[in-house]
Amino acid sequence: MVLGTAVRTGRWTGAGVAAAAAGAILPDLIDKPLGYLLLGGNLHQGRIFCHTLLFALLVLATAVLMGRQKAGGLPLVFAAGFLLHQLLDQMWLTPVHWLHPLLGPFPPAEPIDFFRWSLSAELTSISEWAFLVPVAAMALTLFHPLAPGTSGPILRRAGRRAAPFGVPLLLALAAAGVLAGLSLLPFSLMTGSTPGRDWIIALVASAGAAILVVREESLYMGRGDEGSGDRVRSAGW
């Protein structure tokens, strides 16, 4: 979602956010059910086809072609979200997966209760909770026009109230990422993570804070709000 706010894809910033978010979650939406359910008897892992460099290049090439056919910048934003997913997963650390099929088939993994482990990892990861507030604020603010009835303004007000906490939380997360990357903290920001990912989290959080500051006005301009002059000057956004 932070990536989507950094680009201008039209009059509604939410379109870019939706495209980036869709690209960022697509690899897991496809590979996790495929690797743990449909192919669980042979693979039992969630980083397979959509986590390969080949698939990422295909997504990027498709986005470029669609952009040339007057599809706008949304396909490229989608591709950027897709590539960012592989960056955060540090796929280059497992070349047999990332460079598939050049290095042979995917190696089978030991069976685990992935969905229970994943839920536990999400709930115990500091980075997930720190990202929650700014992401929720952006979602409420940008997508309130889609809410039915009179709930839209209520959601937008909720997003505005949460907004001032976004930048401070991201900056705190960036600082914690640096400390964890330097092994100055007794824990990683993500359960089962590595110092390398802590550095990536610090970079993403810093970029997110900068983007939120720069794109303050766009974040508060929902579809149909253009020209209203209703700019919110909340501290930190």
Image: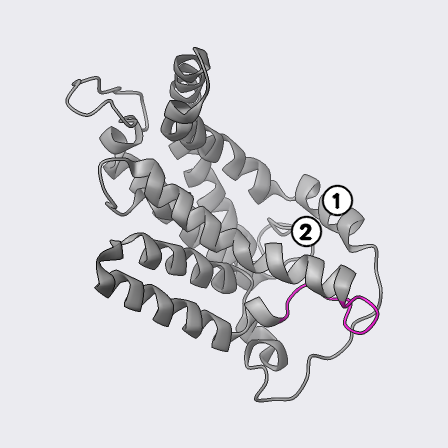
Query: In this rendering, would 81 be left or right of 108?
Result: left
Asked if residue 141 is positioned above or below residue 98 in the image, the reply reads above
Residue 42 picture quarter: bottom right
Query: In this rendering, would 79 be left or right of 136?
Result: left
Check whether the beta carbons of the residues at disc 2 and disc 1 lie within 8 A of each other.
yes
Q: Is residue 15 shown to the viewer in this render?
A: yes
Percent from the top left, x then y, of residue 154?
44, 13
Q: Is residue 178 shown to the viewer in this render?
A: no
Residue 235 picture quarter: top left
| Crowd rating for badge 2 (residues with CA inside 10 Å; few <14, some 14–19, many 20+) | some
Q: Is residue 146 magenta?
A: no
Q: Residue at x 73, y 79 (%)?
A: 107
Q: Amino acid at mark 2?
A: Thr
Quadrant assignment for the C terminus: top left
Q: Residue at x 83, y 55 (%)?
A: 113
Residue 95 picture quarter: bottom right
User: Which marked residue is nearer to the observer: mark 2 or mark 1?
Assistant: 1
Span highlighted in magenta in the image: 39-48
Query: In this rendering, would 33 be left or right of 77?
Result: right
Quadrant assignment for the N terminus: top left
Asked if residue 116 is positioned above or below residue 135 in the image, the reply reads below
Report the magenta stretch's main SS: loop
Q: Is residue 46 magenta?
A: yes
Q: Nearer the viewer, residue 115 or 175?
A: 115
Q: Which label is found at residue 120?
A: 1
Percent from the top left, x then y, of residue 210?
30, 42
Percent from the top left, x then y, of residue 4?
35, 45
Q: Which residue was labeled with disc 2? A: 191
Asked if residue 167 is positioned above or below residue 50 in the image, the reply reads above
Q: Amino acid at mark 1?
A: Ser
Q: Which label is found at residue 194?
A: none
Q: Residue at x 29, y 46 (%)?
A: 6
